Image: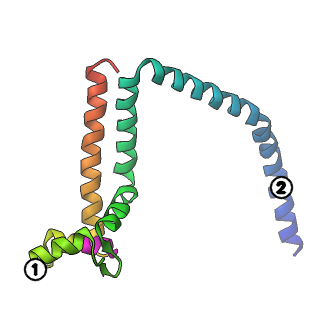
């Protein structure tokens, strides 16, 4: 027990000065964030087109890294749920139109993704590819047009 208390005291002696330094820097960080926000807002007001392209590129980059941000809500909205196709949904209408669903097909892959199965990887890769391409195009447009 004494060894544990001694280790805790050493950790406290090491961490507390760092916490004090970090706490002392909070006003500086807050002022920097406030200034950066004001500068970004001023830039957006004077350069709305370029700002929109930058925003599109940033959103595309985030979606490329984390495609579930878009894929999961989109699948749910279309009617692909964890326990099957939702009655009365767009997915139900499509399924009624195509009849029997085969496993390697697009519909089966989307249903699998909605249920958290093998389709998640395929849908995530597709969303990442599309958003990555869109993000690259937006960044390219900003570069080409002087953004």
Residue ID for mark 2: 12
Label 2 to label 1, Cα distance in Å? 66 Å
Of helix, strand and loop, which one carries label 2? Answer: helix
Q: Residues within 10 Å of mark 2 (few under 14, many from 20)?
A: few
Which residue is located at x 30 percent, y 60 percent? 124
Which residue is located at x 25 percent, y 50 percent? 129
Of helix, strand and loop, which one carries label 1? Answer: loop
Q: Who is closer to the viewer here, 130 or 20?
A: 130
Query: What numbered label is drawn on residue 43?
Result: none
Magenta region, residue range: 110-116
Which residue is located at x 13 percent, y 72 percent? 105
Q: Residues within 10 Å of mark 1 (few under 14, many from 20)?
A: few
Q: Give the image location of residue 8, x and y in percent.
A: 83, 63
The N terminus is located in which quarter? bottom right
85 in relation to 7, above or below: below
134 in relation to 115, above or below: above
Which residue is located at x 80 percent, y 50 percent? 14
Q: Give the image location of residue 87, x and y in percent.
A: 28, 78
Mark 2 and mark 1 in contact? Answer it, CB < 8 Å: no
Q: Give the image location of residue 63, x and y in percent.
A: 37, 50
Q: Nearer the viewer, mark 2 or mark 1?
A: 1
Secondary structure that dominates the magenta span: helix
38 in relation to 117, above or below: above
Q: Who is closer to the viewer here, 88 or 60?
A: 88
Asked if residue 111 lies in the magenta stretch, the reply is yes
- Quarter of the rendering containing residue 100: bottom left
Left or right: 48, with 31 as reference point: left
Residue ID for mark 1: 99
């Amino acid at each position: 027990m004494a060894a544990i208390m001694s280790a805790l005291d050493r950790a406290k002696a090491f961490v507390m000065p760092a916490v004090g330094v970090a706490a002392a820097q909070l006003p500086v960080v807050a002022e920097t964030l406030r200034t950066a926000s004001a500068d970004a807002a001023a830039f957006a007001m004077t350069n709305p087109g370029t700002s929109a392209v930058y925003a599109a590129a940033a959103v595309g980059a985030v979606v490329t890294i984390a495609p579930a941000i878009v894929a999961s809500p989109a699948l749910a909205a279309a009617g692909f749920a964890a326990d099957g196709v939702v009655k009365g949904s767009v997915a139900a209408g499509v399924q009624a139109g195509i009849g029997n669903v085969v496993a390697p097909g697009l519909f089966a892959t989307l249903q699998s993704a909605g249920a958290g199965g093998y389709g998640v990887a395929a849908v995530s890769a597709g969303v990442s590819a599309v958003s990555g391409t869109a993000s690259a195009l937006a960044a390219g447009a900003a570069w080409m047009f002087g953004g």
